[in-house]
Image (tube, grey):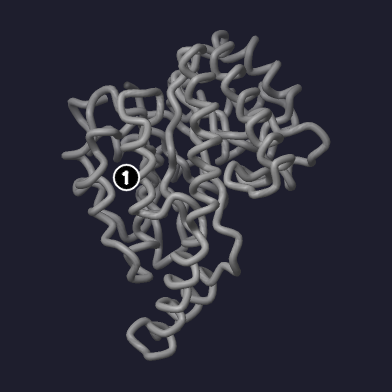
Amino acid sequence: MPLALSTSWNAYRYSDASGMLFEIKQLGFDAIELSFNLTGMMIDEVNSLAHQSGLDILSLHNYCPIPDGLSRKEALPDCYSLSSLDPEERKTAIRYTKRTIDTASSLGAKAVVLHCGRVEIQDRTRELISLYDNNLLETERFIRLRDDFLGQRAKASGGFLDKVISSLDELNSYAGAKGIRLGIENRFYYREIPSFEEVGIILNKFKGSNIYYWHDTGHARVMQNLGFIKNSDYLKTYSQDLLGIHLHNIKGCLDHQAPIKGDLNFLDIRPYIKKDTIKIIEAHHPATALEIKESLEFLKGVFDGII
């Protein structure tokens, strides 16, 4: 499986797909993941241009294309929540996720990456990060805030997790009929679903189906930095169900850095990665073209023999 680049790196700089794909190909990539910020017109262009460009489409990040009536800035992966207690919102989330699955199938992709919604409580992740950035990690203030946040989430999570499982049950059947696998991504904000434990609940519920684990390197490190769970525990626990991985580096809690810049040692990840693991570089702006190109060569060395 080749190393691919997510179009999240350069999609916002283009209103058409041709320039976006040409730039990625010029950096030496043979495969891509289509990100959640692409319009229907861009997806139509990708359908005709990707093969001409010599780029395989390995995966799509929900929602792709963006939902009707939303601007590219509004169309975040969580704009409609699969965990919502509002039946209309959840119905909308399912409908547009099915459209992403349809798009993945039509483009010959292998997988769709899902954000599974959130527990509707006040999120305190950014407050914790602010304290972390100011070297207040071990203070009573930080510990009290984190413990309160943990307690609030645990108390409120049950109904939202039930809705996620119900949504995934419907989507699992739909994706299976289309030959598309679904990757449940570990999250950056602690109120989001799934938590570390919820990954296991979901995987056990759908064992042997089209639902797998999708690992995000930066998100896992944020959870470690804030004292929720060790970074390494995700892959140690769930690598047998690993479908794909978003590869990006992190400085403190600032993620989506180019893989060549940051705190992570990607050699720690290698033992859990197989040849058929979908490997996506998911660096964002302001990573430069040179940094992306150098990251590609760097990761080819890290994953030599399994790409």
The residue identified by callout 1 is: 200
Looking at this view, is 92 or 216 the one in front? Answer: 92
In the drawing, does residue 259 fall left or right of residue 145? left
- Secondary element at tag 1: helix
Q: In percent of the image, x 66 and y 36: which residue is there?
A: 93
Q: Is residue 32 visible?
A: no
Q: Is residue 65 visible?
A: yes
The picture quadrant where one finds residue 37 is top right
Residue 189, given in percent of the width and then of the height, sits at 50, 60
Q: Amino acid at mark 1?
A: Gly
Q: How many marks?
A: 1
Residue 179 vertical position relative to residue 197 in the rendered view, above or below = above
In the drawing, does residue 52 fall left or right of residue 242? right
Residue 305 vertical position relative to residue 284 in the rendered view, above or below = above
Q: Quadrant of the N terminus?
A: top left
Q: In percent of the image, x 40 and y 29: which residue is there?
A: 211
Q: In percent of the image, x 40 and y 58: which residue is there?
A: 250
Q: In percent of the image, x 48 and y 25: which residue is there?
A: 172
Looking at this view, is 4 or 22 the one in front? Answer: 4
The picture quadrant where one finds residue 271 is top left
Residue 304, given in percent of the width and then of the height, sits at 20, 30
Residue 243, given in percent of the width and then of the height, sits at 34, 30
Q: Residue furthest right?
A: 69
Residue 41 vertical position relative to residue 107 in the rendered view, above or below = below
Q: Quadrant of the C terminus?
A: top left
Looking at this view, is 115 or 255 the one in front? Answer: 115
